[in-house]
Amino acid sequence: MMEYVVRFLVGGLAVSAFAMLGDLLRPKDFAGLFGAAPSVALATLGIALLWHDASYAAAQGEAMMLGAVALCIYSILVCQLLMRRHWNALPATVAALPAWLAVAVGLYLLAGAGV
Amino acid sequence: MIVKISFSTLKDGLWSEYLIRFVLGGAATVLTGLISRYFGASVGGLFLALPVIFCASATLIQKHEERRKRQAGVGGRRRGQEAAALDAAGAALGSIGVLAFALVFSLLVARQALWAFVAALVAWIAVSVAAWWAWRRARLSARLRRIANSKRLTSQRPNWARSAETDWSMLR
C-alpha cells in the first residue's frame, strides 16, 4: 500500500513540475515537447529501482520505447483531428486513446512479447 | 530568441487545473505500477508513455486560448483548436525524445542507475529540441518556397489577367 501512496505523490509532483514548465514556455509547439515529457517514467523507473532491481527497470525502459512510438502516432492523429476535422481538444485526445493502446499492444506483440 | 519564457501564462491557470494534473499524474503512475504487478514489468513499461497527461494539457491550452480571445472580443474556438494542435505537434516531436530517453536508460541502468537517469534526461531534451528545430526549419523553408512559387506565378501571368484581377478587387 505504501508503495502506491509514494507512487501517487511522486508521479503527481513530477507531472505537475513538467506541466508547469511547459506552461511557461513559448512558442506552443516547443511547449508541446513537455506535454510528452517522461514525467510518469521518471517516477515509475525511480520507484522500480528502489523496490525492485535494475533488470526490472531495464525491462520497463525497453517496453517504453514501443509506447513512445505509439505516442508519436497518437499525437499526429490528435493534431489531424483538431486541424482537419475541427474537433475540440478533449474529444480528440480521448477518442485517439484506443489508437495509442492498439499501436502499443500491436508493437509489443510484433516484438514477440520478448521486450 | 525563438524560445521564450512567459510567466504571465501562469496567471491563466487555476489551482483546480493544477490539481487535476497532479491527480492525473499520480493516477497514471499508480496504474503503471498495478499493470506491472499483474501483467509483468514489460507490459507496464508500455504505459510509461501513456498520453493521459496530454489529454488534460491540450484541453487546458484550448480553454485558455478561447478565454483570451473572448476577452479580446473575438470568437476563439478555431484559435483554441489550433493552439491545441500545435501542442500535439510538439508532443509528436517530444515522443522521439521519449524514445531516446527509454533507449539510453535501458542501456545504462544495469551499470550505473543514477547516471542512467541523468544521461536519459539529457538524451530526451537534446533529441526533442533537435527534432523541434529540424521541423521548424522544414516548415519555414516550405513556406518560403510557397511564397517564391506564388510570386513566380504572378509574374508569369499575362498583363490582361493581372489588370482584370485589379479591377475585381476594386469592385469588392
Image: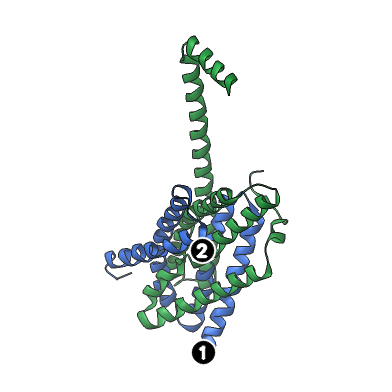
Q: Report the residue that reaches farthest toward the front.
A: B171
Type of the residue with mark 1: Met
Chain B, colour shown: green
Q: Quadrant of residue A98?
A: bottom left
The residue depicted at 58 percent of the width and 24 percent of the height is B172
Is residue A12 found left or right of B49 in the rendered image?
Answer: right
Q: Nearer the viewer, residue A27 or B46?
A: A27
Measuring 52% from the left and 30% from the top, which residue is drawn there?
Answer: B144
For the residues labelled 2 and 1, say whether their Cβ atoms are less than 8 Å apart: no
Chain at tag 2: B
Residues behind callouts 2 and 1 on a single chain = no
Q: Chain of mark 1?
A: A
- The amino acid marked with disc number 2 is Cys
Horizontal side of A21 relative to B124 (left or right) equals right
What whole-number distance in Å separates the C-alpha atoms at marks 2 and 1? 28 Å
- The correct choice, above or below, for B130 with respect to A59 in the image is above
Chain appearing in blue on the rendered image? A
User: Looking at the image, is mark 2 or mark 1 nearer the viewer?
Assistant: 2
x and y, in percent, of residue B19 in the image: 63, 72
Q: Which residue is mark 2?
A: B55
Residue at the image position 53 percent from the left and 42 percent from the top: B136
Residue B95 in the image: x percent, y percent?
Answer: 47, 57
* The quadrant where residue B39 appears: bottom left
Which secondary structure, mark 1? loop
Q: Residue at x 50, y 51 (%)?
A: B89
Q: Which residue is mark 1?
A: A1
